[in-house]
Image (tube, rainbow, N blue to C red):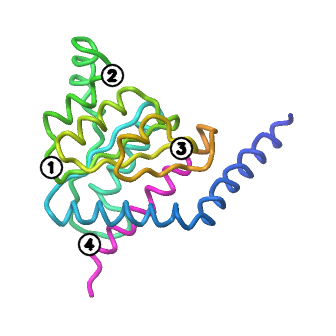
Amino acid sequence: MKNWEIISNNISNSIKVKNEILNDESLINQILDVAETIQNSFENNCKLLLCGNGGSAADAQHLAAEFSGRYYMDRDPLHAEALHTDTSFMTAVANDYSYNDVYSRLIRGIGKKGDILIGLSTSGNSTNIVNALKEAKELGIKTIGFTGKNGGEINQHCDIIIKVPSRDTPRIQEAHLLIGHAICELVEKNLFSKP
């Protein structure tokens, strides 16, 4: 396959996944539910926590920055944080306990009822994300999953789950960011637009 064909295929496949999302009324309604859930949490002075691995960790950090900094509007910051940004904590817990515990242990320390945890896992089977969602549920934290077509193990531990209709990791991650941006725009508009 020639280089331009690789690029063309990637773009075409990305568009196909996004068109499937666009035409899935149930999935669009779940995205709206996530936005409303996050908005309600912020209105109650709670926080949004996000976690993922690899590219999904980068997406978690990107989305946390959109909420805590700004998206389109010049407005007050919202309390959103990606859980992997404290490398001393991450490496200490991974060394002293297990990498499977890095997120669940931090949630136990900083999470409270009314907060929201978004776990991003393209397979839905990342043990540290599953453990984080389990811990969050025990603390009364709302759990949201961003995953791929099958949902994997996190299906059992999420109040709302966003399943991108793909099994291809890059296409799933692209869609996660698109969906996250849409959610951020909705939350920002609803919290800060003047009537």
Percent coordinates x, y for residue 124 in the rendering: 47, 36
Q: What predominant SS class does the magenta segment belong to?
A: helix
Judging by the rendered image, the residue that carries numbered circle 3 is: 173
Badge 3 density bin: few <14, some 14–19, many ≥20, Cα 10 Å? many
Amino acid on which the number 1 mark rests in the picture: Lys
Residue identifier under label 4:
191
How far is the residue under mark 3 from the one under mark 2?
21 Å
Reply yes or no: does residue 183 show up in magenta: yes
In magenta stretch: residue 169: no
Q: What distance separates the C-alpha of mark 2 from that of mark 4?
A: 35 Å
Q: How many marks?
A: 4
Residue that numbered label 1 is attached to: 113
Q: Position of residue 156 (x, y in %)?
A: 39, 40
Mark 1 and mark 4: Cα distance apart in space: 21 Å
Chain part drawn in magenta: 174-195
Residue carrying label 2: 100
Return the disc, 2 or 1, that comes first in the chain's sequence: 2
